[in-house]
Amino acid sequence: MSGVVGKRPALSWAVNLSVLFLVALWTLPTFGILVSSFRDKDQLAVSGWWTSLTGSERNIVARTDAPDDAVEENGQWVLSGNVFESGSGKATAFGISSREPNAFEAGTEAELRDGGILTVQENGDYRLVYDEQPEGRRGQRIFVASVEPPKFTLENYDRVLFSEGIGKSFLNTLTVTIPATVIPILIAAYAAYALSWMQFPGRALLLATIVGLLVVPLQVSLIPLLRLYNDIGVGKSFIGIWLAHTAFGLPLAVYLLRNYIAGLPREIIESARVDGASDFEIFGKIILPLSFPALASFAIFQFLWVWNDLLVATVFLGNNEEQLVLTGRLRELLGSRGGNWEILTASAFVAIVVPIIVFFALQRYLVRGLLAGSVKGG
């Protein structure tokens, strides 16, 4: 024997490292989206989320007040202000020409062509001094290299939820996902019980047909189904997409639940029948409680599939504003706001937060063996 009792095999370390790598591979991007969704849009455009807690370097272009607004002080004409719109930041260098934007260090003086003396301090305060009264309506441009402190804001979520239509799409997605998850589970649970514990002609053939439907690509049925739904009056409606997702999810649901229910102890079912329980009573009081882990497992898969779906929603709902789902809204934002990362990250996190909650709420049922405890407790 290559292993010793009480010692962990060497392969387990490789397995643990692989699991940690996969966890990090999935967690880091999600965490990055979360952090980015709260960052200031200007800082997000120039630096990655991993630099969110440090100052970000940024080159800005400011303009002084108009020369006509100069104020006389001690025989000189002065213009003053701050180059930072937000009033916070640290200037490291400045310039008066786009060819040399960092020609002068902060705190030093720069002489302009018109005779003015410009000084920009580290806090962004500038002071432009003239010996004679200047004239003009256009201020002097100032190029500033700055380091700004980290900024976090809820403005991104405010714009997304109330200005970009995500809130409406969020409700539409819930309207699609919840029924499209519950309906196939109810139907599949009854079907799985019948295929497992009820005797009727053609049961094996029906089961083989259901298994065969698993390999049929859903794309080949989209157009025929849409034509059928249009003929009966449920095309481009929530009822139509509920029926579509139910049809696409039923083969897998029946197959998984049938395998689980068929593995339940026969003694439990036979004892209930001896006591006079009907099939409906057996199903409701025995099968459903024992099958909850399997039901929850399929609910996770179906919920995630429907929530993240774009193809089926586009075919059976379309792209109108009243019925657009989250994935469709994100597609529209990518097309019209490809450079607005603060909107995209906030929208993306709004789209994934519900699946994350559902997964962590039900994930224990993916690995939980409830059967043994239920038999002992019965």
Image (cartoon, rainbow, N blue to C red):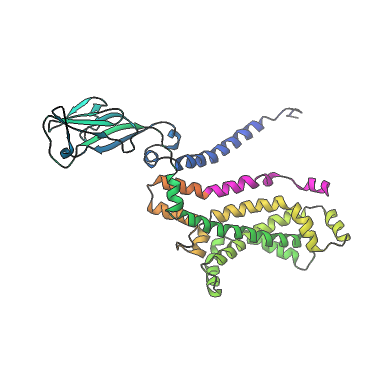
Given residues 214 and 36, the one toward you in this image is: 36
Asked if residue 196 lies left or right of residue 184, the reply is right
Asked if residue 317 lies left or right of residue 89, the reply is right
Q: Residue lying farthest left? A: 132
Q: Looking at the magenta stretch, what is its main secondary structure?
A: helix
Find the magenta span and give its range.
352-378
For the N terminus, the quadrant is top right
Residue 1 appears in the rendering: yes
* Residue 36: % across, % down: 45, 41
Asked if residue 340 lies left or right of residue 106, the reply is right
- Total count of labels: 0
Asked if residue 13 lies left or right of residue 127, the reply is right
Given residues 216 and 73, the one toward you in this image is: 73
Q: State whether residue 165 is above or below residue 339.
A: below
* Residue 282: % across, % down: 80, 59
* Residue 211: % across, % down: 67, 60
The answer to which quarter of the image holds residue 55 is top left
Residue placed at 59% from the left, 35% from the top? Answer: 20
Q: State whether residue 152 is above or below residue 375.
A: above
* Residue 130: % across, % down: 14, 31
The answer to which quarter of the image holds residue 345 is top left
Residue 250 appears in the rendering: no
Residue placed at 88% from the left, 60% from the top? Answer: 275
Q: Is residue 358 magenta?
A: yes
Q: Is residue 346 magenta?
A: no
